[in-house]
Amino acid sequence: MRYMFVTVGTGRDRKDIARAILKSIRNHNPDRVIFFSTEKSKNETIPFIEEEYKDFEIVIFEDENDIELIKQKCDEVIGRYKQVENYTIVDYTSGTKAMSAGIILSAIENNVDLISYITGKRDETGRVISGTERFVSFYPSQVHSKRLYMEGVRYFNLRMFEAAKSLFENAIQMYEGNDVGEKAKLLIRLCDAYLNWDLFNHKEALEILKGLSREELSLLSNLGIKSRVERHKELLYKLANEQFSLEKMLDLLKNAERRFLDGRYDDCVARLYRLIEYILQFRIAEMDLYKKKNNSYDVSEINLEKLPEDLRYKYGRPLGLEASTKLLVELKDKLGSEIHSSEELKKILSARNYSILAHGFDPIERKTAEKFLNLAKDFIFNLVKKYNKKAVNFDFDNIYSQLDFPRLNRI
């Protein structure tokens, strides 16, 4: 069924309004019309409409200038007819400004299928001249689509990629025939890429970004994030293909920082614990003490032949953080020794060991996560730079800032 909701005014001589409404009814061909009217319009305008069209009902506005009451009444009536199988049309060509505003607000909120009005050349009083009329229509789904898209952008900037992707998909489903559609499709791909990156699936993230078309890259430029995405392809290549790299070290740190900013302190500390362990593994790999398999270091197995004889019986098993630290201390490695001697680190690791994501039941507090985060930054920016040959000309601050996920400032 096609239902049409029409506001009814009085116009110059009532007949002009009746003609315009009848023209709109003929154009949209509804099965039934619901007129929103004042008592005056009911008595003076609708009789001229009734001469030609009789399948209607009338809803009276008690106060044609109270937009709140008007919208409430429109919500009540439109909501009664707004069912999946029905097609609904709103025409606000005539009536007071409050009547037009109220029914439009209700139409958008209730997601009617079409909003229409008649325009044309106007006389000195501002009224449309008979014979110059033309129809202008728009779809409320466009408004909802844009709203969903904007909400998706907000979630994207909050790094809530699954929620953002769902909103972009809904925006496309709601109304694909506008400029939101192409941008939403692109941002769905970016959601997939950065969600994979956030989950350490660097190869998958890289493949998605590498697969962007020339047109999509141009759209990225319009969104103001093309240069960052291009740089991320370079960084992801390293993250995906190098087992031990300074970029991967910083990526772990940045991942932990994101968890901290989201208020997920246990997740933050769990990543920082792995980061400290990774720093130690990095150092052991630099000393070529791991066995190799398929051109990669097997961190579960120390090459005992490369250790002094008195240490071989101690380190034949896979090494965790504590054992890795002790090994480096016994090998008189300065980086390992400084990590081992850090009293602040010992306190934080103790808190981590009693946390719910380790061996205990206590959640990590914000201040503990913040201390650990700052300490991890110090280890990377100072200790690693101090003892790692590759780090001499490595711009830690610049690379660390480049690892920030893109934010959409243009939409």
Image (spheres, rainbow, N blue to C red):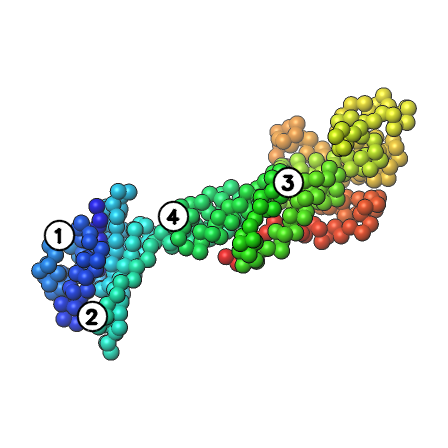
Gap between marks 3 and 2 measured at Cα: 64 Å
- On the image, numbered disc 1 is attached to which residue? 55
Q: Which amino acid does the dot numbered 2 rest on?
A: Gly
- On the image, numbered disc 4 is attached to which residue? 174
Dot 3: what SS?
Answer: helix
| Left or right of residue 150: residue 119 | left
| Left or right of residue 73: residue 278 | right
Of callouts 4 and 1, the N-terminal one: 1
How far from the left and from the top, in percent, is residue 350?
71, 33
How dense is the environment of label 3, judged by Cα within 10 Å: few (below 14), some, or many (20 and up)?
many
| Residue name at image x 25 percent, y 45 percent | 86
Q: Which amino acid does the dot numbered 4 rest on?
A: Met
Dot 2: what SS?
Answer: loop
How far from the left and from the top, in percent, is residue 34?
18, 53
- On the image, numbered disc 2 is attached to which residue? 131
| Residue name at image x 83 percent, y 31 percent | 289
| Left or right of residue 160: residue 26 | left
Q: Which amino acid does the dot numbered 3 rest on?
A: His
| Residue name at image x 61 percent, y 34 percent | 363
Tell whether label 4 touches label 3 (CB within 8 Å).
no
How dense is the environment of label 4, judged by Cα within 10 Å: few (below 14), some, or many (20 and up)?
some
On screen, residue 317 above or below 52: above
Point out which mark residue 109 bears.
none
Residue mark closest to the camera, 3 vs 2: 2
Point out which mark residue 202 bears.
3
